Amino acid sequence: MKFSEYKYQRPDYEYEKKVFSDNMEKLKKAESFESFRKILDDINKQRNRIESMKIVASINYSINTGDKNNIAEKNYWDENAPKYDKLNVDLYKIIIDSKYDKEIIETYGMQFYNIIKCSISEISDEIITDLIEENRLCSEYTRLLAAGNVVFGGEKLNLSEVNKYTTDSNRNIRKSAAEAFSGYFEEHEEEFDILFDKLVKVRDRIAKKLGYENFVELGYKRMKRTDYNENDVSKLRKAVENSWDIIIDKINKNKSERLSIEKIKYYDDEVEFPGWNMEPEIEYDEMIKSAEKMYSELSDETGMFFRNLVENEMMDLKTAPRKGMGGYCTYVPDLKSPFVFANFNRSFDDVDTLTHEMGHGFQLYMSNWIDMPEINFPTLDSCEIHSMTMEFITMPWMELFFGKNASKYKYSHLCTISRLIPYCMVVDEFQHIIYRNINMTPNDRKKLWRNLEKKYIKYKDYDDNSFLDRGGWWLRQGHIFKNPFYYIDYALASLCAIQLAEKYTENHHEGWNLYMDICKVGGTRSFNEIVNIANLDSPFEDESISKIVRKISQSLDVKIANEK
Ligand SMILES: [Zn+2]
């Protein structure tokens, strides 16, 4: 079915609740697992229909944020989604309390069982008002960023507009853009500080009401981490601290030479090549054609997947007035299909959507046999393996998009991921300390941040920017405000994607099969299980990190030698 033929209908909560509750009563009384399963199938049909409506409403809104109907439906879901979520938690409790736990685990998997257990332990009636407060504070952060205006080059620009100039090939321009950008946060420093302080305290209160010692353990539960813990993550941080500098030094040494810069400053980070603005060389229609060619050549399955998306209108990538920002991939259960969204503006992000978001899409397409909505997507640590691996394995086709600059794109891509890893460590350790010491002052927090930067990103030089030098960088990092403990997932996934891409390069056939295997299991397996299925070394082992460091280092050498 085409997206435009799928009819959106706002569900009636009271009616849905009645049907849901009746079925839950039946579920409690089921006299065999056979009948338990049948009732659960019915409940899932209803849940998938409701979920599909919610997703379609949010897709429609992002396609046209100015449309009255779209706004009305978005508001309906903002207000009512928590009520539907509550029904789900009631269902989880019945599943956990049922006498069929053995059969449930056999049928739906241990991961499903563990995930719903996590969901139950995150919520209770006593914390509802705190959760509303937490959401309100998160929206306040979004509002503060969206309202962000700075004057740059005599013009009033929003933050994302000025951000574009921070990678300008002219060093003076990118320096003043970086100053203008951080200037906004300095100007509103106190507001951000107060907001964050409230968030830390409300989260601590929620955790304590639920019986946790502090927010750290609850943060892990919210991320649905079922098979690794804080100690594993802290081992990973240690390994990165001990071994990653060699990669960064190599990248920076080359950058200094290429850009003729003696000392690399914070505003030089994203720029690798003089005079290249990282734009694709072709227009929209040609990009879609190139993507189709790329996916058809990559494999039969990806070819079919991409043609399906195009034919069924399950992607909307072209820029349009009032279209939302950014790119994402979501899943419409009733159509058994992913939907990919972007707002192409002829930047390298457009290509990123065609590889990264399509990687998510391909996983969802290969695992659309899963009818249980909790396990369509894997947890985020695993999820990003599929997307980031796709970024790497489509590299041989980058000439289609970047022409003679493709090798520059490939090199810059590897540098970006290499820099991301130690940054993830800073964010992650920062949050562990913050939520263990909730009474730190805003200045203590900034000092801590700067010290962690000195630990993991030694070269970072804030030049004459005193605000950043006293630890103001993280105010721009939305995850720290809105999605605590998320950030390490990017590192975990990157460390896996780098390995899987390497396997693919060494042996296309074997590498591809491993990739397909993890796509097919969708969210039915935990992170460590997915690492095993793909035959990768665990990022929690010291030795894996040293191996990855050696590989990246070699790969950088090859790319640098090719340049010369
Ligand atoms: Zn992603």
Image (tube, grey):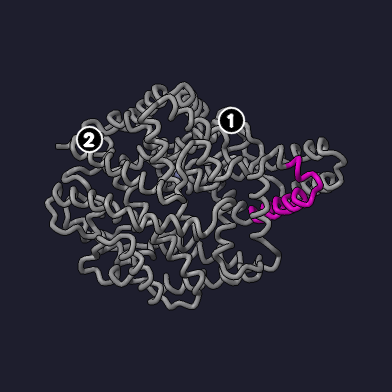
Locate the C terminus by quadrant: top left
Asked which secondary structure carries label 1, the reply is helix
Residue 252 in the image, given as x and y percentages of width and height: 21, 52
Q: Would residue 56 be found to the left or right of residue 269 on screen?
A: right
Position in image of residue 344 (x %, y %): 37, 40
**How many badges with numbers are in the image?**
2
The residue at 71%/37% (across/down) is: 107
What residue is at 34 percent from the left and 30 percent from the top?
A: 287
Which amino acid lies under the numbered mark 1 shown in the image of this protein?
Glu
Q: How crowded is mark 1: few (under 14 residues within 10 Å), some or many (20 or more)?
A: few
Judged from the image, the secondary structure of the residue bearing numbered disc 2 is: helix
Q: Which of the 4 image quarters holds residue 3?
A: top right
Mark closest to the chain's N terminus, 2 or 1: 1
Is residue 556 shown left or right of residue 523?
Answer: left
| 426, 126: nearer the viewer | 426
Q: Please name the residue that numbered disc 2 is placed on.
A: 405
Query: Residue 87 colored magenta?
Result: yes
What crowding class fits label 2: few (fewer than 14 Cα within 10 Å), some (14-19), or many (20 or more)? some
Q: Quadrant of the N terminus?
A: top right
Q: Mark 1 points at which residue?
A: 5
The reply to whether residue 95 is visible in this rendering is yes
Q: Principal SS element in the magenta part?
A: helix
Tell me where residue 173 appears, x and y as whole percent: 19, 56
- x then y, percent, for residue 500: 42, 36
Reply yes or no: does residue 412 show up in magenta: no
Instruction: Specify the quarter for ligand 1.
Output: top left
- The part of the chain drawn in magenta is 81-104
Q: Please give the name of the residue rendered at 56% of the width and 66% of the height, measured from the top-left corner.
A: 215
